[in-house]
Amino acid sequence: MARSEPKRERTDALAGAIVRAVRVEAGLSQRDLAARAGTSGATVAAYEGGSKEPRLSTLRRLVQAAGMRLELGYVPEMAGEPGGGLTREEARSLALHRAITARLAADPAPDLSTTSVVITPRRARTSR
Protein backbone atom coordinates (compact mmCIF):
# COMPACT_ATOMS: atom_id res chain seq x y z
CA MET A 1 0.00 0.00 0.00
CA ALA A 2 1.53 3.30 -1.08
CA ARG A 3 1.77 6.08 1.46
CA SER A 4 0.22 9.29 0.36
CA GLU A 5 2.20 12.48 0.72
CA PRO A 6 0.86 14.88 3.33
CA LYS A 7 -1.04 17.80 1.87
CA ARG A 8 1.13 20.85 1.59
CA GLU A 9 -0.24 24.35 1.50
CA ARG A 10 0.80 25.82 -1.81
CA THR A 11 2.19 29.30 -1.68
CA ASP A 12 3.37 29.41 -5.28
CA ALA A 13 0.21 31.21 -6.39
CA LEU A 14 0.96 33.97 -3.87
CA ALA A 15 4.62 34.16 -4.87
CA GLY A 16 3.61 34.26 -8.53
CA ALA A 17 1.14 37.05 -7.83
CA ILE A 18 3.88 39.03 -6.09
CA VAL A 19 6.27 38.55 -9.01
CA ARG A 20 3.62 39.64 -11.50
CA ALA A 21 2.49 42.63 -9.41
CA VAL A 22 6.00 44.07 -8.97
CA ARG A 23 6.85 43.42 -12.62
CA VAL A 24 3.72 45.19 -13.87
CA GLU A 25 4.17 48.04 -11.36
CA ALA A 26 7.74 48.54 -12.63
CA GLY A 27 6.54 48.45 -16.25
CA LEU A 28 8.78 45.51 -17.14
CA SER A 29 8.23 42.54 -19.43
CA GLN A 30 8.93 39.06 -18.10
CA ARG A 31 12.10 39.00 -20.19
CA ASP A 32 13.27 42.40 -18.84
CA LEU A 33 12.68 41.37 -15.23
CA ALA A 34 14.44 38.06 -15.84
CA ALA A 35 17.48 39.81 -17.34
CA ARG A 36 17.73 42.19 -14.39
CA ALA A 37 17.39 39.32 -11.89
CA GLY A 38 19.77 36.96 -13.69
CA THR A 39 17.24 34.30 -14.66
CA SER A 40 15.24 33.37 -17.77
CA GLY A 41 11.95 34.73 -19.03
CA ALA A 42 10.56 31.20 -19.00
CA THR A 43 11.34 30.91 -15.29
CA VAL A 44 9.59 34.21 -14.52
CA ALA A 45 6.59 33.00 -16.56
CA ALA A 46 6.56 29.73 -14.60
CA TYR A 47 6.60 31.64 -11.29
CA GLU A 48 3.78 33.93 -12.41
CA GLY A 49 1.77 30.99 -13.75
CA GLY A 50 2.14 29.05 -10.50
CA SER A 51 3.78 26.00 -12.06
CA LYS A 52 7.02 26.75 -10.22
CA GLU A 53 7.64 28.27 -6.80
CA PRO A 54 10.64 30.54 -6.20
CA ARG A 55 12.76 30.27 -3.10
CA LEU A 56 12.52 33.22 -0.76
CA SER A 57 15.96 34.44 -1.85
CA THR A 58 14.89 34.26 -5.50
CA LEU A 59 11.64 36.10 -4.78
CA ARG A 60 13.62 38.81 -3.00
CA ARG A 61 16.02 39.07 -5.96
CA LEU A 62 13.11 39.40 -8.43
CA VAL A 63 11.42 42.07 -6.34
CA GLN A 64 14.69 44.00 -6.00
CA ALA A 65 15.26 43.71 -9.76
CA ALA A 66 11.94 45.51 -10.19
CA GLY A 67 13.22 48.32 -7.97
CA MET A 68 11.24 47.36 -4.88
CA ARG A 69 11.87 45.82 -1.47
CA LEU A 70 10.30 42.60 -0.20
CA GLU A 71 9.04 42.76 3.37
CA LEU A 72 7.67 39.81 5.28
CA GLY A 73 5.64 39.96 8.43
CA TYR A 74 3.10 38.16 10.50
CA VAL A 75 -0.13 39.14 12.17
CA PRO A 76 -2.20 37.43 14.83
CA GLU A 77 -5.06 35.35 13.55
CA MET A 78 -8.43 36.97 14.01
CA ALA A 79 -11.32 35.37 15.83
CA GLY A 80 -13.33 33.26 13.43
CA GLU A 81 -10.25 32.25 11.46
CA PRO A 82 -8.60 28.89 12.03
CA GLY A 83 -6.73 29.11 15.30
CA GLY A 84 -7.98 32.66 15.89
CA GLY A 85 -7.51 33.74 19.45
CA LEU A 86 -8.06 37.48 19.76
CA THR A 87 -10.65 38.74 22.14
CA ARG A 88 -13.12 41.31 20.87
CA GLU A 89 -11.21 44.05 22.69
CA GLU A 90 -7.90 42.93 21.18
CA ALA A 91 -9.42 42.81 17.68
CA ARG A 92 -10.81 46.35 18.09
CA SER A 93 -7.44 47.58 19.35
CA LEU A 94 -5.65 45.94 16.43
CA ALA A 95 -8.10 47.51 13.98
CA LEU A 96 -7.54 50.93 15.55
CA HIS A 97 -3.76 50.57 15.37
CA ARG A 98 -3.97 49.47 11.74
CA ALA A 99 -6.10 52.53 10.92
CA ILE A 100 -3.58 54.81 12.64
CA THR A 101 -0.72 53.14 10.77
CA ALA A 102 -2.51 53.56 7.44
CA ARG A 103 -3.21 57.22 8.16
CA LEU A 104 0.41 57.87 9.12
CA ALA A 105 1.60 56.03 6.01
CA ALA A 106 -0.59 58.32 3.90
CA ASP A 107 0.64 61.46 5.70
CA PRO A 108 3.88 60.66 7.57
CA ALA A 109 4.37 64.21 8.83
CA PRO A 110 1.00 65.44 10.07
CA ASP A 111 0.89 68.88 11.64
CA LEU A 112 0.52 67.86 15.26
CA SER A 113 0.36 71.48 16.41
CA THR A 114 -3.21 71.69 15.09
CA THR A 115 -4.27 68.38 16.60
CA SER A 116 -6.09 68.50 19.88
CA VAL A 117 -7.19 65.82 22.25
CA VAL A 118 -10.15 66.50 24.46
CA ILE A 119 -10.56 64.44 27.58
CA THR A 120 -13.89 64.83 29.26
CA PRO A 121 -14.01 63.51 32.80
CA ARG A 122 -17.02 61.44 33.70
CA ARG A 123 -19.22 62.71 36.44
CA ALA A 124 -19.36 60.54 39.46
CA ARG A 125 -22.77 59.03 39.99
CA THR A 126 -24.38 59.75 43.27
CA SER A 127 -26.59 57.14 44.81
CA ARG A 128 -29.89 58.18 46.32
Image (cartoon, helix red, strand yellow):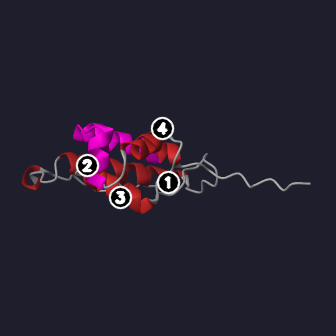
Q: Going by the image, does 83 lie left or right of 114? A: right
Q: Going by the image, does 85 lie left or right of 66? A: right
Q: Which residue is mark 3?
A: 60
| The N terminus lies in quadrant | bottom right
Q: Nearer the viewer, mark 3 or mark 1?
A: 3
Q: Which residue is mark 2?
A: 66
Rate crowding at label 4 as few (under 14), some (14 to 19) or many (20 or more) other CA atoms within 10 Å: some
Mark 4 / mark 3, whichever is N-terminal: 4
What residue lies at 33% left-to-right and 58% top-to-bottom? 61
In the rendered image, the vertical position of residue 7 relative to residue 49, given as above or below: below
What residue lies at 51% left-to-right and 57% top-to-bottom? 76
Is residue 31 on the magenta stretch? yes
Q: CA distance from mark 2 to mark 3?
A: 10 Å
The boundaries of the magenta stretch are 15-37
Q: Position of residue 22 (x, y in %)?
A: 31, 44
What residue lies at 31% left-to-right and 52% top-to-bottom? 63
- Amino acid type, label 4: Gly
Q: Position of residue 82 (x, y in %)?
A: 64, 50
Rate crowding at label 2 as few (under 14), some (14 to 19) or many (20 or more) other CA atoms within 10 Å: many
**What element does badge 3 sit on?**
helix
Rate crowding at label 3 as few (under 14), some (14 to 19) or many (20 or more) other CA atoms within 10 Å: some
Which residue is nearer to you in this view: 7 or 125? 7
Which quadrant of the view contains residue 71?
bottom left
Which residue is nearer to you in this view: 124 or 74? 74
Q: Which residue is mark 1?
A: 89
Q: Which residue is mark 4?
A: 49
